[in-house]
Amino acid sequence: MNRPLVETEGTTRLRIVDCDIHPTQKSPAALFPYMEKRWVEHLQTFGSHIRQALVGQLSYPRMTANGMRMDARPTDGPPGSSLEMLREQHLDLLDIEVGHLIALGRGGMEERNPDLSAAMARAVNDWQIAEWVEPEPRLRAGIVVPQDNPEAAVAEIERRAGDRRFVQVIMSTRPNETLGARKYWPIYAAAAEAGLPLCLHPAGYSSGKPSTGTGWPSFYFQEHYTFVPGSEALVTSLIIEGVVEAFPKLKVAIIEGGFSWAPALGWRMDKHFDTFHKEVPHLKRKPSDYMKEHFWWATQPMEEPKNGRHIADVIDWIGWDRILYSSDYPHWDYDDAYRIFRFPVEPHQRESVLGGNARKLYGYA
Amino acid sequence: MPSRRPLRIDADFHLPQAEVGDLLPFLDEYWQMQVTDRELPSMPFRLTSYPANAPLTRNPDFEGLDVPAALDRFGTGIAIASMLHGVVALHNPHMRAALLSAVNDYVAATWLDAEPRLRGSIYVSGEDPAASVAEIERLSGDRRFVQVLMLAMQEIHHGNRHYWPIYEACQKHGLTLAIHAGGLYRIPPSVSGWPSYQFEDYVMQSMAFENILTGFLGEGVFQKFPDLHVVFLESGFAWLPTTIWRNDKTWRGVRQEVPWLDRKPSEVMAGRVFLSLQPADPPGADELRQTLKHIGSTDMLLYSTDYPHRQFTGDEPLPAGLPEEALPGILVANALRAYPRLADDPAVRQAAEAMEETT
Amino acid sequence: MTRHVVASVDGFPDKGIRRIEVAGREICLIRVGEEFFALLDRCPHAGARLSGGRLSGTVESDGPGDYRLCRKAEMLKCPWHGWEYDVRTGQSWSDPKSTRTRAYAVEAVAGGELVKGPYVADTVPVEVEGKYVVVDLPEPAARRADTSTKA
């Protein structure tokens, strides 16, 4: 294996927590055992109903291997569908202690039929436990919720909240309304009540809105960038609309949306808070205070400025206790835990980012 | 009026919005009749992006400060002025074009004729490139217009070839392409949907500019129009490091899709993209210095007051923390690279040379 | 230098990529037509095994919408981030020539001049002797230090 990269001799083992692993089904039918017959028949007849022209496909085809690592395709299904391969290529190879599943597809997050979306979320949650977490205790599940059916979303959180194998609540980052909208607040109340962080990971094209505030890009090159402004908008929304003020226990993990923009966004919100604070009297503190208190940030895809230390400057502002390692396995822009720091870091900083911060956030020993 | 302060070129200076009635002399008989019969003067066509009485739009510090007084107060030698008129948001393409032409003519007759320190913007709609090209051609002979102005949040992405005729006309006439914050509200300001508050809309302006810059790069605008210069106004600039780092990294993996990007995106944009200094979002000198270090250069920054918007307090629009050696560029030299028409302007050249002699 | 027979020519498909282990080293062996190439099997960018990648060409362009596929199958795309390596030299080609003068830039694109990128994958001499593919390795095989251990 190509892993004798880090001198382990004389040092303690790095206890790595990977906050972004994408499991997928070998085929759509793999979820049918977890659904009522009625919904199986519905899906077989009508398929899913989303706000996108190409259902279940990419309107920005990726550059290679459908957006996956070229070396991660098992013989019997798509990349991400084989637990054996996940172990061999990632969990064992990098010696991952805990891995968080983020089940993006087929969870009904963006399904328009409200009852179907609830059934799909429930199925994908059962499937994560039965086919991944049960056989592989290093893995943890995330509660996928049908957020545009908030009542069902709350019920799903309550159904799973007692099961410690579920460690967070996953919402679509391209929902029908901006995430700060009051419609979604019952979901935040339920997550905060259950002590579960909210995990936001860019996905999908089915919000029925262009992927930028100035229209649809033409190329994947641009689409890849939209994850950044998209995530910035979510943080802005959750802070300014008063969500984190209303739910002081709510913790939010921004996954695969980047982190290097956090200082600039915090400064921008603070600066213009000066001009706009009378419009938002529900905010009791300056926006960057909320940002520093309520948000955590995942590393991948880690930026690689010519001077790597510029990333350290950014983390100095955010806080070394707020950055979470994520690999994005099996996607093409995968980051290897041993390669993300292209600049000198202190051992305790490395330990925090690679695992310590996640253990604190998610309450692991 | 003449002050001993060195020349300052203000890239983002706003003129008070003309009332619809003021535009009547600049409309033909048919549109005059339409304005009267449809009672358009009862609709001021103000942009949602800039609520007339909000502190953002009307800095309380500038109360009673009219255009010449504002130029005096900040020691402005040349100000590139724009009137962010809401007629750009109309759907009727003919009414929109007629009123936009009237706004442009009004600016020339009312402001550029009266105040020699002002330079103008040819304000166009991105929605009808043919009409916009015709407007650029109509006004291109008036060298006091130094830029073509569009809003940041439109319905179609700025890099898109839909707009290329406009960019071609800019390049042909040495007019800079200026994108100013604000939007048509045809689509939500972010993929995440319609925010509830003005505050969010305003914060999200800089996110639109991130996408716009990435769009200009990806769609090949800088390759297609090698003499086109682009200026972002009221965009903020603290977001640039992430955009530069991301695009340079992503490009390595997706180069085959956009092979016209024959160098790192950060190299392609160098000397082609300029950003106005205000709002300077970093809260203090240290944060500003760090941002500039991460950007790697101050060559793309243009001094701006954003008058009469509220982006700073006091009399000094320059934020603390700018390196002394960067000031000549930020105040003058960068603008001369961004605006070919300013560089050709004898009055501006003379003033710039006088400044060199004194410094 | 020590010569190691690492494969037989028969049965090694055209445009095939194989990972082989020889003298304690992992090597990515590539066939393009009648030629064989070998690279050390680790991407210098982020550590992926290059043998999991695909052969590709370079794409040149005169401007938006213009695509010209060149050097078909002579570039190896890394299986993770898609960085391209010249199978002949191991040179990263993802950093084509940077030119400052505008007029020259247009011609440089047309000419498709490419210059060296920042990363080079190690190449290994390889030759075909009759039915066998032979790799020349220096000895002793010094292990490459990895940069991340120093960080």
Image (spheres, coloured by chain):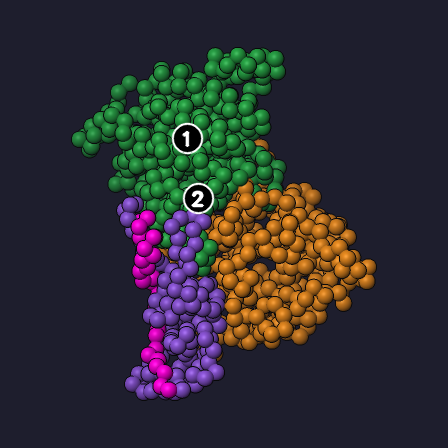
Residue B238's spot in the image, x, y percent?
A: 42, 44
Q: In this view of the protein, which residue sits in the foreground, A151 or A193?
A: A151
Kindly identify which chain the residue marked by label 2 belongs to: B
- The residue under label 1 is B148
* Letter of the chain in orange: A
How many discs appear?
A: 2
Q: Nearer the viewer, residue B308 or A82?
A: A82
Picture residue at 41% right of the left edge, 73% below the top: C32
Q: Are marks 1 and 2 in contact (CB under 8 Å)?
A: no
Q: Which residues, given as a range, are shown in magenta? A: C105-130
Tell me the crowding category of disc 2: few under 14, some 14 to 19, or many 20 or more residues within 10 angstroms, Cα based. many
When the figure is inspected, residue A199 is found, relative to residue C10, above or below; the finding is: above
Q: Is residue B350 above or below residue B269?
A: above
Kind of residue sitting beneath label 1:
Val
* Residue C78, position as x, y percentages in the image: 45, 67
Q: Name the residue: 36% across, 28% down.
A: B146
Question: Could you give the CA–CA distance between mark 1 and mark 2, rounded to whole angstroms?
Answer: 16 Å
The crowd level at tag 1 (other Cα within 10 Å; few <14, some 14-19, many 20+) is many
On screen, residue A122 versus residue C27, left or right, reads: right
Quarter the N terminus of chain C occupies: bottom left
Q: Quick one: label 1 or label 2, which is nearer the N terminus? A: 1
Q: Is residue B116 magenta?
A: no
Q: Which chain is green?
A: B
Q: Give me the disc on residue B216.
A: 2
Give the color of chain C as drawn.
Answer: purple
Asked if residue C92 lies left or right of residue B47, the reply is left
